[in-house]
Amino acid sequence: MTPSHQAVPAARGWLAAAGVVLAFGATPAAAVETIVFIGNSFTYAQGSAVQTYRPSTVTDLNGTNIGGIPALFKSFTAQAGLDYAVSLETVGGSGLDLHYNTKRSLLDRPWDHVVMHTFSTLDAARPGNPATLLQYSALFVGLFERQNPNVDINLMATWSRADQTYPRTGAWFGQDIYAMSRDVRAGYELAAATVPGIDGVIPVGAAWDLAWRTGYADPNPYDGITAGQRNLWASDSYHASLYGSYLEALTVFGSVTGLDPLSLGADEQAARDLGIAPADVLRMQQLASTTLQVAAIPEPETYALMALGLGAIGLVARRRRQAAVATPVAEPALA
């Protein structure tokens, strides 16, 4: 079920200076909406304090007493005046195939919203291969639509793993830190484009990419963390840290509800509970907000525009308009 949308100006800080205008839905839902999160340790935030955050506020269908990203989502929506009944079904190291084949009875219900993702490399045995994702996304769509034809189903595209990029044993060794995220996102976008019933892709990996490109986070934990930058990974350089999990949850919140993550404010309650400083909260809200606004703009131009900074953004935009008038061209496909 899709919330009503209303344009709300929310540009702030360095984004306002860059002339970025944000527009997110702002009308609270009138009734309780149900949502289920299906995933693995990337959903339950293994290795960070988020894993045990307020488990009593959500329903863990497996009974493992996890809060995780769903509990952060619940906190965000409550602060926004929305009423969501939040459930999760998570198994560490799993893909959608395991959930469909072994947990289907728990999930076969009339949900309003579904957020799901598969194994972090798309396929544990064949990194980067989306075949299993495509197959089981379609099976899940059939399952959920039989119970609720209007169910809103979103796939969550996850982040690049440092342990898959920098060590020689990694599947993306020798490539830049953005390569894995690009390949994973492409797999999810393919599923959304080819599986009827998938409503969208939540670009969590792109939010992480933006954090690195803009200097908020350090892109390589193997050579030490630069002073003043945050590490989005946990100590295993695989799972999300407290900061990575918080950025993940903000991106999910904005994508599912249509609300601007900046609307939560620097004094957001879950961040206070977890000990995240207001300056970090606001910066991550800006990152999530910007990511959601530019999610439909093709790579690599999207990040180039943001990284170039204030004056360059306007210059590039003017050049693009001039080029469009002189020689109309088709937009490139989304990466």
Image (cartoon, rainbow, N blue to C red):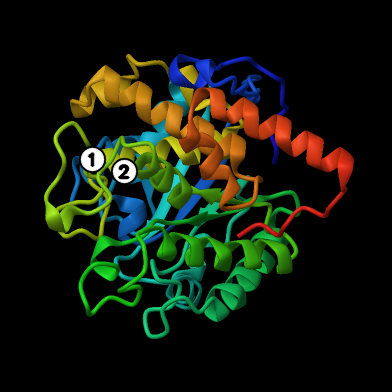
| Image marks 1 and 2: residues in contact by CB distance under 8 Å | yes
Q: Which of the image's four quarters has the N terminus?
A: top right
Three-letter code, disc 2: Ser
Q: Nearer the viewer, residue 189 or 259?
A: 189
Which quarter of the figure has residue 169?
Answer: bottom left
Disc 1/disc 2 C-alpha distance (Å):
5 Å
Is residue 124 shown left or right of residue 136? left
Task: Identify which residue is drawn at 14% across, 35% down.
Answer: 227
In the rendering, which numbered label is found on residue 140? none
Three-letter code, disc 1: Leu
Tell me the residue that label 1 is attached to: 242
Q: Is residue 169 above or below residue 209?
A: below
Is residue 75 shown left or right of residue 280? right
Tell me the residue that label 2 is attached to: 245
Q: In this view, does 189 lie above or below 226?
A: below
Residue 141, horizontal then vertical, whole percent = 66, 64
Residue 278, horizontal then vertical, whole percent = 27, 18
Can residue 256 be spotted in the picture? no
Q: In this view, does 22 lie above or below 155?
A: above
Is residue 76 shown left or right of residue 67? right
User: What secondary structure is found at the residue carrying circle 1?
Assistant: helix
Q: Which of the image's four quarters has the C terminus?
A: bottom right
Can residue 257 be spotted in the picture? yes
